[in-house]
Amino acid sequence: MALMIPPVKLKWLEHLNGSWITDDSESIATREGVSVLYSKLLTNKEVVLLPQQVLCLKGPQLPDFERESLSSDEQEHYLDALLSSQMALAKMVCSDSPFASALRKRLLVLQRIFYGLSNKYHDKGKVKQQQHSPENNSGSSDLHSVSERPRSSTDALIEMGVRTGLSLLFALLRQSWMMPPPGPGGLNLCNDVIHTAMDVVSSLPPLSLANESKIPPMGLDCLTQVNTFLKGVTMPNSGADVLGRRLASELLLGLAAQRGSLRYLLEWVEMALVASTVVSAMEKEKMKVCPLNQEGLIGYDCFMNILMQMRRSLGSSADRSQWREPTRTSDGLCSLYEAALCLFEEVKYPLKYHFTGQFMFFCLLKKSFILLMNAICMGYEVIVYM
């Protein structure tokens, strides 16, 4: 009798998906790294060892000594039985080898990592929502088809209230831009609302909006509408004042960092480069809209706090002396253009190890490079360390 490798029972825990995604994937290539990750599975009880099965090896029943010779069919039958027994024994011996044990552990670890990636980035409901999102040239009404379950009258009333409330809020903010600027100590409705939203987002734990499969479709639709509105606010010709555009840029970056997806970070890079290009064009045409020349800027402390939070969550062992940081002005601000380059440099390292193959990445990366080329043509100096 021989003991085979004990079977296991898999119980993946949903709240540990994020930690498995951020683990160092290179450690799977070594036996020591696989052992550490497999021990993590056993400690978290995501892999439960079952009782070992005892396999009795019983060879074929060979004939006793007989004077008569065996027929060819009988000889072939006995040979096949012997070969089958030897194959079963070889298979069991190989399965008990250190190589087979390490290979099985590696497969279990890979299965756990792929499960976390699939649940986080390729959830069926999320994929369906992305297929119906406005970025894929579909109308906003298509988002109603995301949820497969029939909506009740209460859900419909809540959705109607949220949508109309957002439309009313955006309309009031746009109307406040047309009013004369308030005096010292006056109330600026747009800036106060965005500042309050920024305080709420900054107080959230990191990656609070990352698991979009847990966010209802109406919540994702609201985030899309807010992002679209804020992108419009950041443009120099939006009608908002300089402070409002700066706060909108910071809020957009905070939301992108909380959602933890490369897509939204690259969308912010695209927004920053577009706004910087527009500002550069207006300056060349001597059409400065701000006498203090504070267009195209973002708060240095706000940007660096988000950047450091990303670096801590990344846990990269790369040389940090090579990481780019924007130049801080005397007013505690930094250029949107430099911030975009810093963020673009930051997301370059995890791309080498955590690329998930999303098609949206290629589209946004192509846009970012086109905008970088446009920035070069506008007179900016671009230095990207690859």
Image (tube, rainbow, N blue to C red):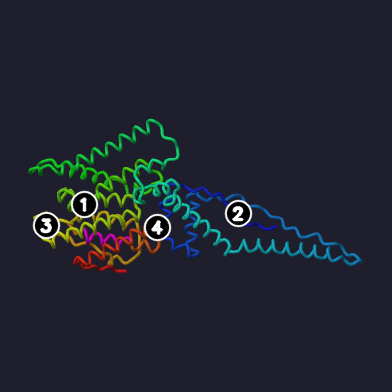
- In the rendering, which numbered label is found on residue 6? 2
Label 1 crowding class (10 Å Cα cut-off): few <14, some 14-19, many 20+?
many
* Contact between labelled residues 4 and 3, with CB atoms less than 8 Å apart: no
Magenta includes 340? Answer: yes
Q: Secondary structure at mark 2?
A: loop
Q: Quadrant of residue 139?
A: top left
Residue 377 vs residue 9, the one in the foreground: 377
Left or right: 78 as drawn, with respect to 116: right
Q: Amino acid at mark 1?
A: Thr
- Residue 195 within the magenta-colored segment of the rendering: no
**Quadrant assignment for the N terminus:** bottom right
Residue matched to label 4: 359
First in residue order: circle 2 vs circle 4: 2
Going by the numbered disc 2, the residue's amino acid type is Pro
| Residue 350, above or below 149 | below
Between 6 and 122, which is closer to the camera in this rendering? 122
Of labels 2 and 1, earlier in sequence is: 2
- Sort mark 4 into few (<14), some (14-19) or many (20+) by Cα contacts within 10 Å: few
Could you classify mark 2 by the number of other residues whose Cα lies within 10 Å: few (under 14), some (14-19), or many (20 or more)? few
Q: CA distance from mark 2 to mark 3?
A: 73 Å
Give above or below for 285 relative to 164.
below
Compared across the picture, whether 287 is left or right of 105 comes to left
Q: Quadrant of the C terminus?
A: bottom left
Residue 283 left/right relative to 132: left
> Magenta-highlighted stretch: main secondary structure?
helix
Q: CA distance from mark 1 to mark 4?
A: 26 Å
Disc 3/disc 4 C-alpha distance (Å): 38 Å
Marks 2 and 1 sit apart, C-alpha to C-alpha, by 60 Å
* Residue of label 3: 288
Tag on residue 89? none
Q: Residue visible at 50% across and 55% down?
A: 111
- According to the image, label 1 marks what residue? 234
